[in-house]
Image (tube, rainbow, N blue to C red):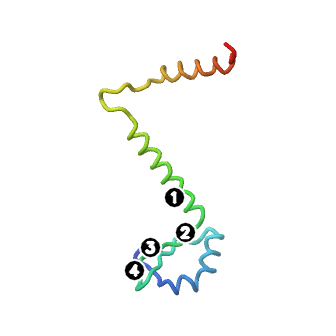
């Protein structure tokens, strides 16, 4: 069922048990519902919802990184820079009293 097939809220409510069984069986598709058959919401399997949340979180994280990356005049770390920094951190952790 796609966006072109919107059921009313009442129809979605009446079919909720059948929709959930389809999701459980792995055969259910998202169900769009709303007043006057104008999509206002969607019912999706939990696995789909979790993937959407994960992707949204990744997108937010990527946007934060892009915002923090220095412009043309900034210094970008190389792989060697990171290796050196991690090496110093590992050395400091191995010998905390020094």
At horizontal 57% and vertical 23% (from top left) the residue drawn is: 86
Badge 2 or badge 3: first in the primary sequence:
3
Which callout, 3 or 4, points to the residue nearer the camera? 4
Of mark 2 and mark 1, the one earlier in the sequence is 2
Q: Earlier in the sequence, mark 4 or mark 1?
A: 4
Q: Which residue is mark 2?
A: 44
Looking at the picture, how far across and down is residue 59, in whole percent?
45, 49
For label 3, the crowd category at 10 Å Cα-Cα, with few meaning under 14, some 14 to 19 and many 20 or more, is few
Q: CA distance from mark 1 to mark 3?
A: 17 Å
Q: Secondary structure at mark 3?
A: loop
Label at residue 52? 1
In the picture, measured across the screen, residue 11 lies left or right of residue 96, that is left
- Quarter-wise, where is residue 44 in the image? bottom right
Give the secondary structure at mark 1. Answer: helix
Residue at the disc numbered 4: 38
| Residue 28 falls left or right of residue 67 | right
Disc 2 and disc 3: Cα gap in Å?
12 Å
User: From the viewer's perspective, is the residue at label 2 or at label 3 nearer?
Assistant: 2
**Vertical placement of 74 versus 23: above or below?**
above
- Residue 2 is labelled as 3
């Amino acid at each position: 069922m796609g966006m072109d097939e919107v059921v009313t809220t009442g129809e979605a409510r009446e079919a909720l048990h059948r929709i959930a069984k389809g999701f459980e069986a792995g055969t259910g598709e998202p169900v769009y519902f709303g007043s006057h058959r104008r999509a206002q919401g969607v019912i999706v399997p939990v696995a789909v919802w979790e993937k959407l949340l994960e992707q949204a979180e990744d997108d937010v994280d990527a946007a934060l990184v892009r915002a923090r990356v220095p412009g043309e005049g900034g210094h970008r770390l190389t792989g060697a820079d990171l290796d050196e920094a991690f090496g110093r951190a590992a050395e400091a952790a191995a010998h905390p009293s020094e």
